[in-house]
Every structure is written in C-alpha cells, then in structure tokens.
Image (spheres, helix red, strand yellow):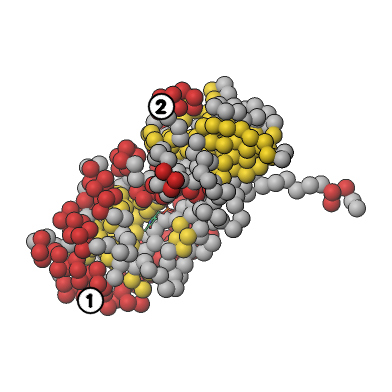
Amino acid sequence: MSAETVVKKEAPKHADRIGYPLVGQELTVGGVPISRLAARVGSTPFFAYDRELMTARVKRLRAALPKDVHLHYAMKANPMPAVVQHMAGLVDGLDVASAGEMHVALDTGTRPETISFAGPGKTPQELSQAVAAGIIINMESFTEMETIARLGKDIGVIPKVAIRVNPDFELKTSGMKMGGGPKQFGVDAELVPQMLTRVGELGLDFYGFHIFSGSQNLRVDALLEAQEKTINLAIELSKHAPRPPRLVNIGGGFGIPYFPGEQHLDLEAVGEGLEALMPRARAELAGAEIVIELGRYLVGEAGVYVSRVVDRKESRGTVYLITDGGLHHQLSASGNFGQVIRKNYPVAIGNKMGLPEAEESNIVGCLCTPLDRLGDKVGLPRGDIGDLVVVFQSGAYGRSSSPTAFLGHPAPAEVLI
Ligand SMILES: *Cc1c(COP(=O)(O)O)cnc(C)c1O
C-alpha cells in the first residue's frame, strides 16, 4: 500500500458559523454572553434571536440580488411577533399562511397590499378575514376562487388575488419539493389559463402569480434553473391574464447549511444568475414586481436554542449530557421523529467555547424517547451539570414547528436581542 492510501479522509465538518463572537469562554448572542443571557431570560431552555444578524442578512441579499427584485419574509419560518416586526422594517412584504399569521403581520403596520396569503386549505372564515383586510390571497384552487368572489360580494370589497401555480417542473435537490407533478399546492399550470378567464368574469382584482417550487436548497444551478423556468412560465401565463400582472412571486428556496459537509449558499452567484434573467422579465413582465420570498434564509442562522445540562451520565463507556431541552422544542435538530440517518446540527457548550475537545458526548433531551437527541458523538470539552448547550441554525422552524405539548413540559422562552 502506498502512503497516500492510508491517509484517513477527514470527516466532513459543519460550515463556518456566521456571527456569535466569543468573549473569553462565552459565546455571545446579540453581544450578550450566554451565561448572562440565561440569567436575563430567567429559565432554560430558550431560543435567542440576534436582530443584527437578520439585518445583516437582508443587507447582503439586497447587495447580491438585482436592485428591482422585491424581498418578502415568509413568516412561518419564525412567527415570533418581535421578529416579524423587525423583519417588516427590513423587507418589502410579508407572506402569511394562516389568519393567525395575518394578524401578526398586520400588527406590524405592513401595508395590506404587500402581504400575501398562501396555503392549500384556507377556510371560508380565514378567506373572509383576508378579503376584509385587503391582503393579496394566493388562490390555490377553483373552489377557493369562487368562495373568495362570493365573500367579496358579501363584505362589499373587491378581493385582491393572485394565482398560486403548481408548475410543471420542480426545484431539483430541494429539502422539500412544493411544485411539479401532482401537488396539494396551487393550481396546475395547464389549468391556469382557464382560471384566469374566470378571474376576469368574477371581477376579482388580479395581481399576478405565485410560483413556489421548493425549499432548503443550497445549489446555485438548481435555484437558477427553477428561477428561469418560473419566469418563463409567468410570461407564458400572463398572456391569458385579464390584465398585466403587477406581481410575480418567483418563490425562494434558499437554504442554509445544517449538517456536516454542507456549504453556505453562494448568494452572489445566485444574484448574478438572476440578474441575467431580469432583462427578459423586465421586458415581458413590464409593470410586475418580481418578488423572492424567503423564510429560513433570513432568520435561520440568526437564532440559537439554548438548554442546560441537568445530568451527566456515563453508560457503559458512553457519555450522555442530559439537558432540560429536547425535540419538543427543536424537533428538526433531533432528526424529525426518526430521520433515516440522523445528522447533527452544529452544537456547542456555550460557556466553554475555545476549550479543547476532551471527549465525545451524546447530547440528549429530557423526554422519555430515544429519539430525543440533540447531538450524537460530538467532540466537546467536558460537559457538566449547569453548562449551557447551544444548538445553532435554530432561528427558523424551531419552537413554532415543534410538538411543545409532547410530554407536558413548559414551552421554551423566546427572546430577540
Ligand atoms: C414555507 C414557505 C416559504 C418559506 O420557505 P423557506 O425554506 O423557509 O425559505 C416560502 N413560501 C411558501 C409558499 C412556503 O410555503
């Protein structure tokens, strides 16, 4: 065997962390050392979000994307009212997915015409609230369209609508595909011309199209391919519209690195690629705002989930750090109830940063299920009772998308710093 063949391949690493500078051995969030922050919050576990990181992210997007592309925040990623308020001051619009989210969005003072409402099962009650509020409803079916028209008459308001299109392509290599083939989302692209005729007959106030094909994508080529197809589809469909579209939401899907080996999205390359598509969009969709809607890319890296070690146990040679947190708060970091191959989010002991690795630890939560894991075999300094375990990449799809009622522990606190 030659010398080369015995060189061990290095295990893939997590991508570099953005933000959270250290002060001594303490990780800081929004400038506050983690131990002091825990004291300030008064209880663990908690989620802490850094407003400066959100601001910086939007600034970077603005610099990278074409100047006339509008940026919306999809608030289901993190619906904490203080976060939504902060984001509302940075972006051009908000995307909501329920009447509950709509109320939070309206409370921020965001103009209703810049709020859009998508979701496959909107109830007549929710639709009527949305019509009355004057937000743009992304219609997901013919049935929904007829209901909206009827409600508009009842309330005496002309509903503002866009059509959510289920495209005839998908966003390749996406964490979650939301378009292409049969889907519960949107109206199949081939049926949209027929729907547009009916929009005209019903006298609805037509704004444009919403074409969202997927989520959590880290590949520039896949994103650009979907953006190009999306713009082409919007151009094609607009020929059938009762009036030229004022709004074309081309989706988003920008991902963030969660697992070892994943790299940060090359945002500048996405921006350049999109710029190259814009001349055609500007010419053929003149008068339409091109909107990109993002959730996790705006807030996901701006938040951490912090829990405290309540027990340290060694079981047959394996170290367990047992925390007061777990999958009931941060489901996705646990592996979503038994992901086939569980991978770790980046984790650290926030009050022992910079100390050398001393052992391989298994970080688990306090629930009575072996699925409640926050980190498998993580190289860490020695963890002890009272230490603060930090799970990064927790600013999106954390508390609000976790089963907080599972096992009856209290819900985690949330702070925006
Ligand atoms: C969930 C969702 C988003 C946000 O997705 P992210 O991956 O958080 O960016 C955007 N638009 C629609 C229609 C969605 O359903």
Which label lies toward us, 1 or 2? 2
Q: Are marks 1 and 2 in contact (CB under 8 Å)?
A: no
Tell me where residue 56 appears, x and y as whole percent.
43, 37
Measured along the vertical axis of the image, is residue 118 above or below residue 56? below
Please give the name of the residue rendered at 39% of the width and 58% of the height, measured from the top-left corner.
251
Tell me where residue 315 appears, x and y as whole percent.
68, 39
Is residue 300 visible in this depiction of the protein?
Answer: no
Q: Nearer the viewer, residue 243 or 6?
A: 6
- Answer with left or right where residue 318 lies relative to residue 23: right
Q: Which residue is mark 1?
A: 197
* Marked residue nearer the N-terminal end (1 or 2): 2
Q: Nearer the viewer, residue 129 or 313?
A: 313
Quarter-wise, where is residue 249 in the image?
bottom left
Split into 4 quadrants, where in the image is the C terminus? top left
Please give the name of the residue rendered at 44% of the width and 73% of the height, measured from the top-left corner.
181
Tell me where residue 136 appears, x and y as whole percent.
24, 58
Disc 1 on helix, strand or loop?
helix
- Residue behind label 1 places its C-beta within 8 angstroms of ligand 1: no
Query: Pointer 1: residues within 10 angstroms few (<14), some, or many (20+)?
Result: few
Quarter-wise, where is residue 340 in the image?
bottom right
| Residue 42: mark | 2
Q: Looking at the picture, which amino acid does disc 2 mark?
A: Gly
Q: Looking at the picture, which amino acid does disc 1 mark?
A: Thr
Tell me where residue 11 appears, x and y as whole percent.
70, 46
Please give the name of the residue rendered at 26% of the width and 73% of the height, measured from the top-left corner.
142
Disc 2 on helix, strand or loop?
loop
Which quadrant does ligand 1 occupy? bottom left
